[in-house]
Amino acid sequence: MHAYSEVVARPLEVVSDPIEIETIAMRTMRLPLNEPFETSFGSIDSRLIFLVSVEAGGLTGWGEVVAAEEPRYSYETVGTAQHVIRDYFAQAMLSRPVANLADLATRFATYRGHNMAKAGLELAYMDLLARTRGQSLSHLIGGTRDQIPVGVSLGIQPSLNRLLERVDRYLSLGYQRIKLKIKPGWDIEIAQEVRRRYSNILLSVDANCAYTIGDKDHLRALDEFGLLMIEQPLNHDDLIDHARLQAEMTTSICLDESITGVKRAEQALDLGSCGIINIKIGRVGGYSQALAIHDLCYSRGIRVWCGGMLESGIGRAHNVALASLPGFSLPGDISASSRYFARDLIVPEVSVAADGTVQVPRGPGLGFEVDPDYISSRTETIERIESVSEARA
Ligand code: OSB
Ligand code: MG
């Protein structure tokens, strides 16, 4: 592995005029999933999508709050995010013109937690900033890749045969890495079977916190299968037990839930809690933290990849931009729109080429058109926040 010391060149840091945001809109809509998605913490068959948009000078920037309906992956929910945006974060954003990303992040930092809610607004701001400058988001944040390698995350299935069928399908579509969701009782044997069938693929597993350090010997059985990584085997806020486990496993641990910001990432690396980090913009509180974690890992030669939250195309388009940064050397959980939904909210939809890559768009902002008619037709709730006084009225 290389140690990098270069600073990532980032047009974002070039000074531009402050943006006076006029309106923040929050929309929710339910999108059915093409097939149920089961993890160690439960199964869902639709996604309640929460979009935020910000308007200034006739332009609109789009973001997505990736919180789920229930506090299982994290404590945030669509409901808590609506509350904190409506009652706190919107005012912070509208109170005076936003000078830059750091200015916005500093305003939000005075409020504890609620990273996905903060991130939704940071995403919308960054899309707006990129559109205002006529630049692509990827270019704005210092992206260097024209296409990004992608993988697929396969939920727990009713049977091994159903799982193998899905592995076959996504490999034949070109996906570069297969990730299997695991839990006690659906772990060693399925990893073994998939590896037996495909000796050379990039294969990983994701436990979503389903084990404890007491399961160490059980988990070590996974070391036989040449996995790229085991993602978040232990508790969601643990670093210590992960370090103990990593010291006894040859498979790299990748942290997801445990990495909630750049400070935690630094501690995880110092403790040896993981060898790989999954960066999700929502989980870490927005672009400000996601970029900082990327830069930290890039400078230390630690591999990162972009995680997913079964987002709509709007959130996924942001993930594509993020994953174009030079440190994203492993395939992301950024699958084609058709892997999730019958119809996505952006045009064109995200598609995966036969070589398992997604093209990074070069048009202004997200680089995909947001489909306003389809969004309107599906919107279930909409709330507009115009100004400090009106928001409080
Ligand atoms: O742990 O990475 C996870 C989806 C929802 C919540 C948590 C996770 C996931 C996924 C799916 O693994 C990733 C995707 O394809 O969006
Ligand atoms: Mg995960």
Image (tube, rainbow, N blue to C red):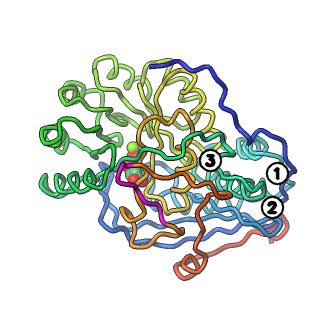
Q: Nearer the viewer, mark 3 or mark 2?
A: 3
* Side (left or right) of 303 relative to 122: left
Q: Position of residue 74 (x, y in %)?
A: 47, 48
* Side (left or right) of 120 relative to 297: right
State how far apart marks 3 and 1 are (Cα): 20 Å
> Which corner quadrant of the image does residue 120 belong to?
bottom right
Residue numbers of the magenta segment: 349-356
Q: Residue 18: within the magenta?
A: no
Residue type, mark 3 in image: Ser
Residue type, mark 1 in image: Val
Residue with the mark numbered 2: 21
Residue with the mark numbered 3: 138
Q: Nearer the viewer, mark 3 or mark 1?
A: 3
Residue type, mark 2 in image: Ile
Residue with the mark numbered 1: 98
- Magenta segment's dominant SS is loop
* Image quadrant in which the N terminus is located: top left
